Image (tube, helix red, strand yellow):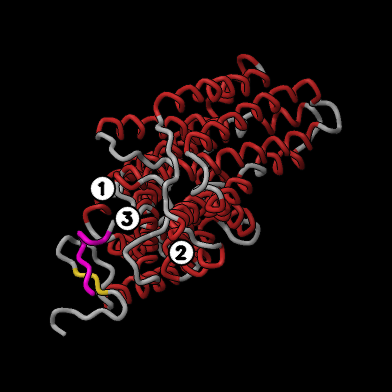
Amino acid sequence: MVFKEEDLPMPGDLGIAEMSSVPGGAVASISTNERKVIFVAVCWLILITFIPYSIGWSFLPVYNEEKDVGISWSAPILSGAPFPLILMCLISPLFLHRVRNKTLFTGSLLLLAGTLLVTGSLHYISTTPTYPYLALAAAIATGTACGVIETTSFCALTSLFPNHLSISTALAELTLNMAIAIGPYLGSILHNAFGYLVAYVVPALVALLSVLLVAIWLPQVTDTSSPSEELSTKELLRAVVNPWIIFPAWHSCVCQILFKIPTPILSLYAEEQFGEGVVWSGMVLFAATTCLAVSAPLWGWITDQVSPFQVMLWSSIALPIVSLLVGPIPPLDPSESQIFIALCLVAVLVPPGCLPALAAMRQGYQIHNSTTHIPPRAASSLVSIYCASYPLGVFLGFTISGLMSKYLSFRYTNIFMTGVFLLETALCVLYCVVLMKRGRALHHLDTVIVLPGAKTNKE
């Protein structure tokens, strides 16, 4: 039994005419223009969801200090959203294949809008002892809504654009990063001009208006998958939890960790080493994030043209080499321009480590389970794991950086983490070489993929 590329339903058995069992799936026929409209709608939903996710980052610590809440509560409130975001990404396969996409989007937007209105109204009880507890609960609800919308959106994109998986996810990731970057600036403007209440009411109203967008632009999808396609939870775990699938997601997470390590400690290092302040470090981080965002669609296009494993391999080799220049490694002397250039180069090399993960996970599923078909629930699970890898990497990067800065300088923190990443590089090389050796990794059009027990023509 030999499968060529055209036999494989890349990135899974989710052709446009068969996208009925995945959230965001399509109807029997859908035109290219309709798909483009839906793509814009999904990106808009990501944008208006993740702007509120980060809108309080700029003013909330100061506001809490003014209300005598203190920094001890600001940190839990700000970190209250990432945990449910990661959790919802991981548990969403339990319901993604059963609930219609419009229902998920509408419910999540209503939850988000209601949460934002409640958060804004907390201004009237900000001096009471219950304020920090309610604020933390609101942050958790916000993270829950964001997790459902993110996973549902990426499921929709994998269904709508099965042959352009990496470029479509790259554009969605670009939208998500833009939203997280816009949120703090928009929050500070609204808070300074109109106050705490308006800073949350405005995005709440936008979320409510976006419910109409969902009703108009997104098609209603009914799950028509046959009962034989359903996987039990035990079967799902057996099919999904394996190194072929988990490693690409973990590699994406580690790339995010390496990129986020310098963020919390760069300003202190710049002030001590060069006499530069927060403005310089902010400019450097903004430039690096811009490089990441601009290069992501290009890397997504490249990944769609070649094997995702090849792109992962190139990135895993180049990334630690460039990362050594951030410190930099002795005997090189640190300078402003050198750190600026090195961080921008690291940012450019992060997308090829992250974007191929979903395509690699889908091929890994097919290899591990000796099949060309990915059941709907398994397809949702792969997207969910992929979506969880990004916020997990960001959270771990900030946490590790904060902990290590107590014992190591900025320079040696980066050098140490680069050394750790070299171990990840060795694992990535081994992972990709093993797949290529077994004839399953490359997915050029003329590539033959032999499944276990298959016989080639030569045999």
Residue extending farthest to the front is: 227
Please state which of residues 78 and 165 is positioned toward the viewer in this rendering: 165
Question: From the viewer's perspective, is residue 165 above or below residue 51?
Answer: below
CA–CA distance between discs 3 and 2?
A: 32 Å
Residue holding disc 3: 11
* Alpha carbon distance from label 3 to label 1: 15 Å
Left or right: residue 386 versus residue 452 is right
- Write down the quadrant of residue 204 in the picture: top right
Q: Name which residue type carries label 3.
A: Pro
Which is in the foreground here, disc 2 or disc 1? Answer: 1
Comes first in the chain, label 3 or label 1: 3
Q: In this view, does 10 lie above or below 135?
A: below
* Residue 335 x %, y %: 42, 49
The residue sitting at the top extreme is 194
Is 130 left, or right, of 78 in this rendering? right
Which numbered circle lies on residue 418?
2
Q: Give the range drawn in magenta.
A: 1-8
The amino acid at mark 1 is: Trp
Amino acid type for the residue under numbered disc 2: Thr
| Residue corresponding to mark 1 | 301
Residue 54 sits inside the magenta stretch: no
- Look at the numbered disc 1 and give the secondary structure of its residue: helix
Q: Nearer the viewer, mark 3 or mark 2?
A: 3
